[in-house]
Amino acid sequence: MSVHTQCLIIPSLYRDSVVLMQLSRTLESQPHIHQAAVMMGTPQNRDLLREAGLLTPEGEVSGANDLLICVQADTPETADAALQHARDLCMQHQVYRDEASETAPRTLATALRRMPDANLACISVPGPYVYREARRALEQGLHVFLFSDHVDLDVELELKHLASEHGLLVMGPDCGTAMIRGTPLGFANQWHSGPVGLIAASGTGLQQVSCVLAHEGIGISHAIGVGGRDLHRDLGGHSMRAALQALAHDTDTRVIVLISKPPDPEVAGILAQEASWSKKPCVLAFIGDDQPRPNMPGLHRATTLEAAALAAAALVRGETPVPRMEPLPPHLIAVAQTARQSLQPTQRLVHGLYCGGTLAAESLWLLRHALEPVDTNLDGSFNAAHHHAVLDLGAEEFTSGRPHPMIDPTLRRQHLLHLAEQSDIAVVLCDVILGWGAHEAPGVALAAAWQEMRERLRQFGRQVIGIATVCGVPHDPQDYTLQCRVLEAHGLILADSNAQAARLAAHIVGAPTDPTTDPTTWNDAEQSASQPDAPQEAPSMPEMPSQLPALFREGPRVINLGLESFATQLRTCGTPVLHVDWQPPASGNAHLASLLERLK
């Protein structure tokens, strides 16, 4: 059967990636449509469309500030009708109006005239425009929650120094999650208030620790994201150190947890010292950082997210944390043993397909201690060879021009169907992230993709074991219980934590389950005894951002630039928010916009 591909360009019309994803889904759901995509006409997006066979010569001439609609249909008439329908849907949003039916502001300056008491800007515009918008927000006295990625390191450093000059905090870039005085920012769960303060260079790491705490009955005072590169040597933990000072002085916070993927060793040492001098019990959850360090009072180290949460819970209860991972639960071992009987002798590999970068890093570290070799895109070692593998599907190479996989599950579905073709895959690990901002039913979406994979596997006479971790809490908007029930009904094994899932996967393919062999099992007292005590002179600590205590006391009043869905969730939670109908400056020429901004 022949198909007909057509493209339509709407000049100088910007829509955020979530709106475009929703439009694409609407088109693809129509009868006789094979493929559809609605994207901004950037060079990267045109490359993606070209590879998918959706870009026509007419679409090739689109610019970065143009909206590009592409469809593949049974007939030219069907394709043309779908394009016109998509155009109508796009134009319905051309004049965005707020709750009071007022036309939304188009710039930050106009928004501030409407909302002069705003104290935080939530920014999720494309990376090339981040410097312009974040700098203006800081100069107007706003803290910045910076969800955007694809931001140069020197831009991040400049913005964080500018924040210090104004007594403000930059959370990001690439900051996925935060919660300030009960207000969820980005992909935050519906946590209860409590005595534990979190600071994380990791969105999903923060969520995993918080959700384990929630299942222990313990709530959160504040959860501060700082961006995935904040513990880079050149950045020196700039935002994490500032946030640490704020939580050290916050009366609602009794226990502090610092969370990160493997940090720069020197930066990790500085943070450990400053955490020790905070005068509050602190847990350091630097995933995979099991190097010996000096004994420091009040400091407790954990090398998995689950261990960090349980240590914090023990400290809240006045107990001494036990630095030891518990054995795998007997019921999980029994389920795994039953499932293992369905595998063929050639099936020996574990593959992880993760939305969360820190969850991927944690699994990688645990699997590499139990199995070898394990390839990954986290360190560039992934080469599609027949090895164990862990993929972070939220990495920049996968998110250029498309929504994050926590919003759009399409990419993981494609990888699952590809894995069905590999005869040596035994176990697939997946994370399911609930909370504000995430996909409306991520467990249901994974279950549907898993069903497709199993049907394809049946054609080859094989089965594969799926293990999922649901990172969520009962009051999340997606219904935690429902997502878990659907996953189990479709044959996936549910683990209580990501670390437990990784250890279970390793066990299925032959690694031992004895916790004494686990890399997280070390005795804090014994290790400390062999190390010199830390210097007793207080280290030089950064100043606390002078405007941060007021944000903690009063809560955020937000101006939102970028993803409209973030404004919607804040409004649902009762947070004062004003959405900006943001459009790319300089007709979408990011280089020209950057040059003009730096001339000011």
Image (cartoon, rainbow, N blue to C red):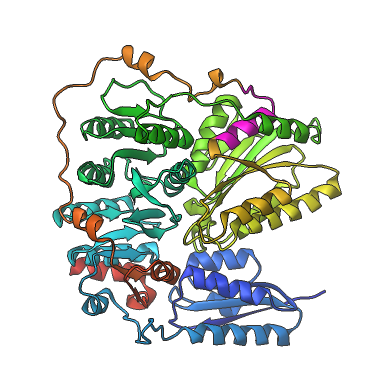
Please state, as top left, top right, bottom left or bottom right, where the C terminus lies in the image: bottom left
Write down the quadrant of residue 53 in the picture: bottom right
Where residue 94 appears, x then y in whole percent?
A: 44, 85
Camera-side residue: 190 or 513? 190
Residue drawn where x is 23% and y is 76% of the image: 109
Residue drawn where x is 38% and y is 81% of the image: 98
Evaluate whether residue 386 shows in this view: no
Residue drawn where x is 44% and y is 19% of the image: 522
Camera-side residue: 99 or 129? 99
Left or right: residue 74 versus residue 503 is right
Camera-side residue: 278 or 460? 278
Write down the quadrant of residue 528 in the picture: top left
Please state, as top left, top right, bottom left or bottom right, where the N terminus lies in the image: bottom right
Residue drawn where x is 14% and y is 29% of the image: 538
Where residue 526 appears, x then y in whole percent?
A: 38, 13
- Taking the view exactly as shown, the residue that stands out farthest to the top is 530
Where residue 560 appears, x then y in whole percent?
A: 34, 69
Left or right: residue 247 versus residue 44 is left
**Whether residue 383 is situated above or below residue 440 in the rendered picture:** above
Q: Which residues are magenta?
A: 500-513
**Whether residue 90 is situated above or below residue 541 in the rendered picture:** below
Evaluate whether residue 541 shows in this view: yes
**Whether residue 518 is situated above or below residue 271 in the rendered picture:** above
Residue 252 forms part of the magenta stretch: no
Where residue 401 appears, x then y in whole percent?
A: 50, 64
Q: Main secondary structure of the magenta part?
A: helix
**Whether residue 237 is situated above or below residue 521 in the rendered picture:** below
